[in-house]
Image: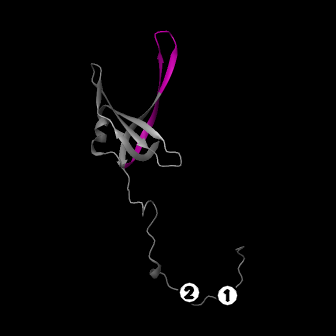
Amino acid sequence: MEVQGRIKVIGETQTFGSNGFRKREVVVTTEEQYPQHLMIEFIQDKTDLLNNYQVGQQVKININLRGREWVNPQGETKYFNSIQGWRIEALQTDATNGDMPPVPPTEAFEPVNDLNEDDHDDLPF
């Protein structure tokens, strides 16, 4: 799966436990009618992937959804979900081009000289 949006926050790399587990979080805001602020975590060697990115940058992040089960000391079972990133790439921010191919200027088109207004077509408009 993938998520696209603008980087809102990039956290520092955190290290946990005696085995040196590393985690780094990034918050990406989607650009849609109802923007979502998604926290995505990068773990272990993937934390370094965020080094070349900055707040405000448009990105596409490839993600995996992760879920885990935990039983608390009272014996209650709890479930947690996380979004784990494994690849990130910058998106083109040129809003005038986007994903659309460039349109040639109007002057590039030949004018129609032999238009016959009496030709019948079956278009309803």
Magenta segment: does it hold 78?
A: yes
Give, as a single range, the part of the protein colored magenta: 58-80
Q: Residues within 10 Å of mark 1 (few under 14, many from 20)?
A: few
Numbered mark located on residue 117 in the image: 1
Q: Quadrant of the C terminus?
A: bottom right
Q: Is residue 108 left or right of residue 51?
A: right
Q: Residues within 10 Å of mark 2 (few under 14, many from 20)?
A: few
Q: Is residue 34 left or right of residue 121?
A: left
**SS majority, magenta:** strand
Magenta segment: does it hold 111?
A: no
Pinpoint residue 30: horizontal percent, then vertical percent: 46, 46
As helix, strand or loop, the secondary structure at mark 2 comes to loop
Q: Amino acid at mark 2?
A: Val
Q: Residue at x 35, y 48 (%)?
A: 56
Pinpoint residue 29: horizontal percent, then vertical percent: 43, 44
Q: Distance of mark 1 from mark 2, alpha carbons?
A: 12 Å
Frontmost residue, 7 versus 43: 7
Q: Quadrant of residue 7?
A: top left
